[in-house]
Image (cartoon, grey):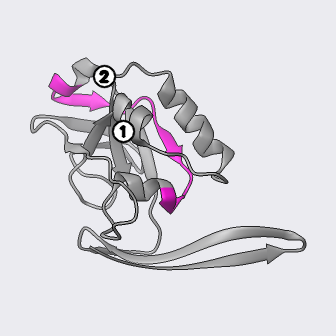
Amino acid sequence: MLISCITGIVRFGNLCHERVVAEMFFRGREMKYLQLTLIPLSPEDLGKTLVHCNNQLSFTQDYRIFGQLIDFDKGDLPTIKARPIPPQMLLENCKNAPGKRTREDGNGAELTFVRAKQLKDELEIPRGTSPGNVAVMKFIDRLPDDTPIILFWW
């Protein structure tokens, strides 16, 4: 997987914001930006054939977080190992796919999941990330450890 990033500082008056402009080839598809929605399920849902995406949380775009969840072949961040969803499982009403039943994320790749415990123990929320990302992690911290969380990339 190839990624090329240009990091720059964008100035608005006296305010400075880090901006990451990324152009990447992700799972064989060219993408300009990457988004991630987390879909927590109940542990029993992994045995079902059809699961509704009732709860959805989105990280705001932060490649320091994304790099811990997906392999960019950069080697500078730990990768939290996600597993494919069970072969019989379909998700319905996922982000950007209302009314659709799917096994694929918004980029056409097979859906994967992690357990809440993996995120609690291994995901590092970087300094300076958005308050929304901090809130998503606080929500995850309150989930039972065995909660499966679908990673829906788009």
Q: Quadrant of the N terminus?
A: bottom left
Secondary structure of residue under mark 2: loop
Q: Is tag 1's residue or tag 2's residue first in the polypeptide sequence?
A: 1
> In the rendered structure, does residue 61 fall within the stretch colored magenta?
yes
Check the image and report above or below for 132 versus 15.
above
Where residue 92 sits in the image (x, y, percent)? Answer: 30, 37
Horizontal and vertical percent position of residue 78: 36, 54
Total numbered badges shown on the rendered structure:
2
**Residue 154 seen anywhere in this rendered image of the structure:** no
The residue labelled by disc 2 is: 146
Q: Residues within 10 Å of mark 1 (few under 14, many from 20)?
A: some
Q: Is residue 151 visible?
A: yes
Magenta stretch bounds: 46-64
The location of residue 113, given as percent across then percent down, is: 28, 40
Picture residue at 73% right of the left edge, 67% below the top: 17
The residue under label 2 is which amino acid type? Asp
Residue under the point 37% across and 42% down: 94
* Label 1 sits on residue: 93
Question: Which of the labelled discs sits on residue 18, or is there none?
Answer: none
CB within 8 Å, label 1 to label 2: no
Residue in the foreground of this view, choosing between 10 and 90: 10
Counting from the top left corner in percent of width and height, residue 4 is at 42, 81
**Three-letter code for the amino acid on which mark 1 is drawn:** Asn
> Helix or strand or loop: what does disc 1 sit on?
strand
Horizontal relation, residue 72 to residue 108: left or right: right
Which quarter of the image is occupied by the C terminus?
bottom left
* Direction right: furthest residue: 14
